[in-house]
Amino acid sequence: AKIRNPTLTLTNTDTSKPSEPYALNKVLTAEELAPVLDAMRQQLISKNVASEIALNITETVKATLVGQKLASFTRVKTMVTQALKSAVMRVLTPKKSTDILHEIISNRRSGKPYTIVFVGINGVGKSTSLAKVCYYLKQHNIKVMIAACDTFRSGAVEQLRSHARCLDVPLFEKGYLKDPGEVAKAAIDEGTANGFDVVLVDTAGRMQNNDKLMRELAKLVQINDPNLLLFVGEALVGNDGIDQLLMFNKALQTYIPRAQAHEVDGIVLTKFDTIDDKVGATLSMSYKTGQPVMFVGTGQKYTHLKKLNVNSVIRALFS
């Protein structure tokens, strides 16, 4: 017998789930996509993705799917989920190398140490993150020096001195109320003279709206031109973390001449072990800056530092 209706619609026979028709060669419309995309947007927000970014990503996916044909025996939700995962993967996949060890070893030919500057507001674990990176580098036989350029907060130099002693690395410091940019420059000169591979530069935990401290940070970056400028933020702060990061970048744009422009190159997220599957800050910060999450802090010990696993983040977002 001939099939009289070539646009046959088949219905899902799995009664454990709401029935969603399968359609052959069906063209997707904005109306059909809307409820599925809205549910996915809400899911991203529930995982701590900033609401504006969740909306932007789902709107981008909608624009790519409208007018496409639904693959045979594929649900709309399945197609949307696959497209969203691909979009998130593109945001989280670094556009440049995040292999710091390779970059450091390649930099040896320059005769100067590879300089990493850590920035962020008070209380996010900036100095501890610096110490963890120091430990990581030492484990790979990299010769490291720490520079105490937080000359503002009482106790900052002592905190770094304690880390340096535990890690058995030299600390370059000039005490308090000094120009942090000049202290960093002197530390890099010292590192050059003594054959250090890396200088890790701690900076004052600036509230992003403190104009004086932001100017000092911009000067430090301008006169020392670090190889890597890392923003340290908490994994669970959501929109606040994005605002902090954008304010740092704005200050660097404002106070550094355009010819020497240098914004944040990478991100370190602390307290990543406390957020369960609410991993949205990784997506939000990378989406806003185009820069990768280089490391995540997963505890209090020096060993509690990991490279970001993009596939794990995607699994958590869509679980």
Image: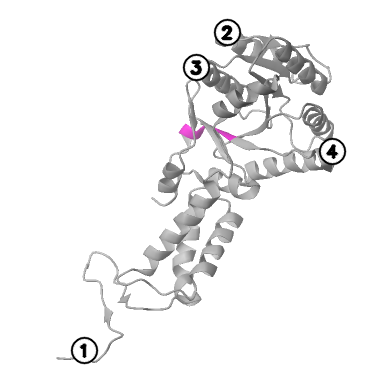
Residue type highlighted by circle 2: Asp
Outermost residue, left direction? 1
The answer to whether residue 155 is seen in the rendering is no
Q: Nearer the viewer, mark 2 or mark 1?
A: 1
* First-in-chain label (4 vs 1): 1
* First-in-chain label (2 vs 4): 2
Percent across and percent down for residue 167 are: 56, 11
Q: Dot 2 lies on which element?
A: loop
Q: Nearer the viewer, mark 2 or mark 3?
A: 3
* First-in-chain label (1 vs 3): 1
Q: Is residue 171 above or below residue 231?
A: above
Q: Dot 1 lies on which element?
A: loop
> Which quarter of the figure has residue 295?
top right
The answer to whether residue 205 is seen in the rendering is yes
- Residue shown at the point (81%, 31%) measured from the top left: 222
- Residue under label 4: 255
Q: Of the numbered discs in the image, which one, if any, rests on residue 139?
A: 3
* First-in-chain label (2 vs 1): 1
Q: Is residue 38 above or below residue 212?
A: below
- Contact? badges 2 and 3 (CB < 8 Å): no
Query: Foreground residue, 239 or 310?
Result: 310
Q: Which residues are magenta?
A: 268-273
- Contact? badges 2 and 4 (CB < 8 Å): no
- Residue under label 1: 3
Q: Of the numbered discs in the image, which one, if any, rests on residue 168?
A: 2
**Distance between the alpha carbons at the discs numbered 4 and 1:** 72 Å
